[in-house]
Amino acid sequence: MLMGKSVSMLSSALVTAHLIADKVWQTLTGQEGIFSTLIAYCHEDAGGKMHRKDICVKRPFAKGEHVLVNGGKPLAPRWNRDPHHPRLLYSEATPSNIRLMAVTMDHKRSVVSDFDGLNMLPSFASDGNRVVYCFTQHGKSQLFCYEVNATNKRSTLRPLTHNDGNNLSPCLLDN
């Protein structure tokens, strides 16, 4: 029973349990449930002569994983907030810096930020037009806002912090 209604068994008890957990979470908090969501993670394979990392995605109740980024040195994947056009931003170590990359569910990769230093830890606006992320150069980590104008499709990058601190792990709220 869920909110006074009978719940039918789905393809398995595990899938049904995740659905019920999502509905209970939404009823209690007013937020969309998270128990059936797609999970992104880095998978490291140190076997053999080659040491590699992949970025994989998986549903909690699914068997197997789907590799989105095959090889390289990816780290810290973060989902955007668009359920209709899911995209992962992640950092990738290169010989000269750690750049910010994007990958779509159909494996299309693109460079988001490739400045000298560290480019990582993005946080997304709910409208999909702004991303705040950390940019570290010369030992100082600052927060920058990357914004795309929806009308003319032009992008801008502007600093949000200007201090001697380490500004890390931004969280961009709806307001």
Image (spheres, rainbow, N blue to C red):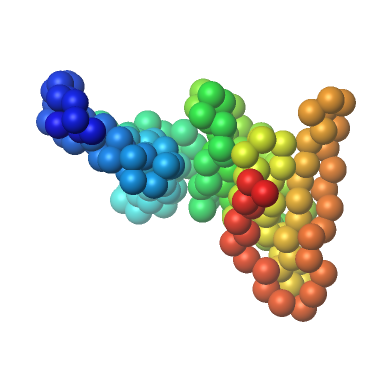
Residue 168 visible: yes
**Based on the displayed image, in which of its 4 quarters is residue 163 positioned?**
bottom right
Question: Which residue is at the far front?
Answer: 4
* Residue 159 pos. (x, y %): 82, 58
Q: Is residue 75 left or right of residue 45?
A: right
The residue located at (66%, 35%) in the rendering is 128
* Residue 95 pos. (x, y %): 66, 56
The residue located at (51%, 29%) in the rendering is 83
Quarter the N terminus occupies: top left
* Residue 141 pos. (x, y %): 71, 68
Q: Nearer the viewer, residue 89 or 97?
A: 89
Residue 114 visible: no
Please, is residue 160 above or below residue 105 in the view? below
* Residue 166 pos. (x, y %): 67, 73
Q: Is residue 23 left or right of residue 138?
A: left
The residue located at (76%, 56%) in the rendering is 144
The residue located at (74%, 72%) in the rendering is 140
Please, is residue 140 above or below residue 105 in the view? below
